[in-house]
Image (cartoon, helix red, strand yellow):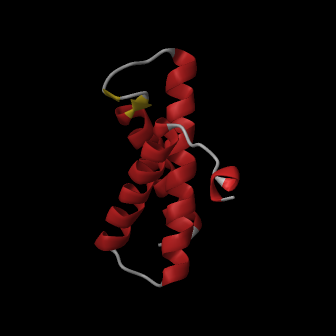
């Protein structure tokens, strides 16, 4: 029963989740706020990480890889999304 409900997740997407969460937590540690802002930062960071990963795959870039995760490009995407989110949330 439990095995039927499990959805396999590719390791690259699990790493994207970890990398995006790490960047969001780092930014939150620098300027701690309430939980709602952390959730917004987390969503922005995950979006940026996935966007950077997909863009790197489409352009064929391969700077630093962990498995299939483009660490540099995904991190740049996360940082840009976090900067945009900070502007949007008026910090």
Q: Is residue 6 left or right of residue 37?
A: right
Q: Is residue 43 left or right of residue 69?
A: right
Q: Is residue 16 left or right of residue 65?
A: right
Query: Does residue 5 appear left or right of residue 8 in this picture?
Result: right
Judge whether 82 appears above or below 27 on screen.
Answer: above
For the image, the number of numbered tags is 0
Viewer-nearest residue: 49 or 14? 14
- Quarter placement of the N terminus: bottom right
Q: Residue at x 37, y 56 (%)?
A: 23
Please say whether residue 90 is visible from this viewpoint.
no
Q: Position of residue 35 (x, y in %)?
A: 49, 82
Q: Which residue is the extreme one toward the front?
A: 1
Residue 8 horizontal/vertical position (percent): 59, 43
Residue 29 in sight in this render: yes
Q: Position of residue 68 (x, y in %)?
A: 43, 27
Q: Is residue 21 above or below residue 71?
A: below
Up the image or down, 62 lies above or below 52; here it is above
Q: Position of residue 90 (x, y in %)?
A: 53, 72
Residue lying at 35% horizontally and 34% vertically, measured from the top left: 72
Residue 4's place in the image compared with 58, above or below, is below
Q: Residue at horizontal 36%, vertical 57%?
A: 22
Outermost residue toward the bottom?
34
Name the residue at 47% across, 85% down: 34
């Amino acid at each position: 029963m439990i095995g039927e409900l499990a959805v396999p997740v590719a390791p690259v997407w699990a790493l994207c989740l970890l990398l995006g969460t790490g960047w969001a937590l780092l930014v939150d540690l620098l300027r701690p706020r309430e939980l709602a802002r952390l959730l917004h930062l987390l969503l922005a960071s995950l979006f940026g990480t996935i966007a950077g990963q997909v863009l790197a795959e489409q352009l064929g870039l391969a700077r630093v890889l962990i498995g299939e995760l483009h660490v540099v490009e995904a991190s740049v995407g996360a940082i840009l999304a976090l900067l945009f989110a900070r502007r949007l949330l008026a910090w």
